[in-house]
Image (cartoon, grey):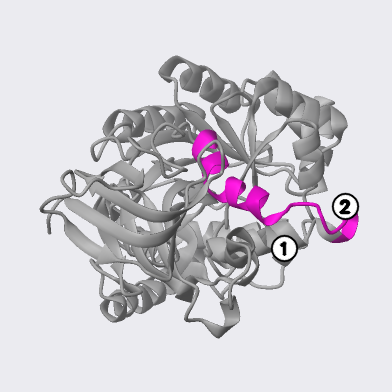
Amino acid sequence: MTSRIWLKNATVVTMNPKREILEGDLLIDDGRLVAVGEVDEEAAEGAEVRDLTGHVVMPGFVQCHIHLCQTLMRNHADDMVLIDWLRRRIWPYEAALSEKTLHVSARVGLAELIRGGTTAILDMGTVHHTDAIGEAVKESGIRAHIGKCMMDFGDEVPGPMREVTAESVRESLRLHEVWHGAAEGRIRYAFAPRFAVSCTEDLLRQVGEAAADLKCHIHTHASETEFENEFTRERYGVSNISFLEDVGITGGRSVLAHGVHVDDDDCRILADTRTAICHCPSSNLKLASGIANMVRYDELGVRVALGADGAPCNNNLDAFIEMRLAALLQKPFHGPRAMPAMRVLELATIDGARALGWEEEIGSLEVGKSADLVVMNLDDDPGCGPGGDVAARIVYTAQKHNVRQVYASGRLLVDGGELVDEDPSALMAEAREARRTVAAEMEQYLP
């Protein structure tokens, strides 16, 4: 395939600073956008032409909290509260993963994400075999911050998951050396201590120092449940967010998943330190963790993005579901004008890119940026029309079956709604076998 692609006659949701929605074309050359809106025919000479009449083109979705390692546990950890869910299902499962089964899990998750239009993620792996996730991301073509999960505290953590502090840090530094900047810069490393409940203060302080020295991201869970606040108040005398600030985990390159149980003082810490919160509405509903106050975050200047979390606590890795819920959940509390569709599109694109430090590369369709984009057919779907505000159609009515094409760095990953580089039937046959292997292995770690 030519490296030059001319996408013609589309509705282009740019997400640029003016939030322009254009009727026009895009020209991709060597993986980058060289024209948006109008394309000079001479400049496009020799390009592959794709007519997108009746289609919407927008930036690829950015999901800032994903667990690719957990995909094989989908539908096997339902209807439980978070702590029981971790202790009785997720930690035994993760303890049972091998490099091979983790690689399959990551490929399944990536296939779902890509098919649904997600082209960049922040992923938290498990304690071991993080290289397998890196390899899967490298093969996939999308962007990702990846990170080994770090856990050095907790009596109920299975043996293979409980680390020695120094070894956890040492392995994280090795992974940073291998993966930060890999795949032509598509992959970056993020230190990933699981959460305050399973990490010692010493580990968290070392993570804060190492991330600052290396200028890389930190990715952790925070204030998902009130239990985390109870834990840090009892142990350290402060709220969870205050504790994370004290040990150096907050900051402009930190993304905290969830942020459901926070007060105004916590929000001020988050705003002052430029720490980003990743809102995961489906996961928070399914685990009955609560509903994050997104309107308050906006009012107090806290940076926010969206993510699906993991397959066992959501059962989907679908950006469309997260967008719709992010919009609807706020309205009963704050009125029908809360979280309008365009604001939600920002969360799923440019705000996610900013949280990951990639706003100069992705998150909007602008000349010079990477050609990470999703093409949707809404006009031929009775459930999406006829017509109406484009942002509202995407957030409130569109679903992943409306995705027809997905490009990442100009590489076509989905065409005609089908994955280009992965056979779903063959992949799922591998996944079923991997799931059987993991299920047998995890028996020894069940409480």
In the displayed structure, does residue 415 sit left or right of residue 245?
left
Q: Quadrant of the C terminus?
A: bottom right
Query: CA–CA distance between discs 1 and 2?
Result: 23 Å
- The answer to whether mark 1 and mark 2 are in CB contact below 8 A is no
Which residue is located at x 12 percent, y 55 percent? 2
Look at label 1 and name its amino acid: Leu
Measured as percent of width and height from the top left, residue 146 is found at 41, 42
Residue 354 sits inside the magenta stretch = yes
SS of the residue at dot 2? helix
Q: Residue 244 at x, y = what percent?
A: 69, 27
Q: Main secondary structure of the magenta part?
A: helix
Image quadrant where residue 388 sits:
bottom right
Q: 168 or 180: nearer the eye?
A: 180
- Residue 81, numbered circle: none
Left or right: 355 as drawn, with respect to 237: left
- Kind of residue at badge 2: His
Q: Crowding near pointer 2: few (<14 within 10 Å), some, many (20+)?
A: some
Residue at (72, 68) in percent of width and height: 80
For the N terminus, the quadrant is bottom left
Magenta region: 332-355
**If you read the primary sequence from the N terminus, does the residue marked by circle 1 or circle 2 appear first?**
1
Q: Image height check: is 35 above or below 75?
A: above
Of the residues tagged 1 and 2, which is closer to the observer? Answer: 2
Query: Picture coordinates of residue 199 (x, y %)?
Result: 61, 35
Q: Nearer the viewer, residue 149 or 387?
A: 387
> Measuring 30% from the left and 32% from the top, which residue is drawn there?
181
- Give the structural element (helix, strand or loop) at label 1: loop
Magenta highlight on residue 353: yes
Reading the image, the residue beneath label 1 is 287
> Can you name the residue that lies furthest to the bottom here?
382
Residue 334's disc is 2
Query: Height in image: 211 above or below 347?
Result: above
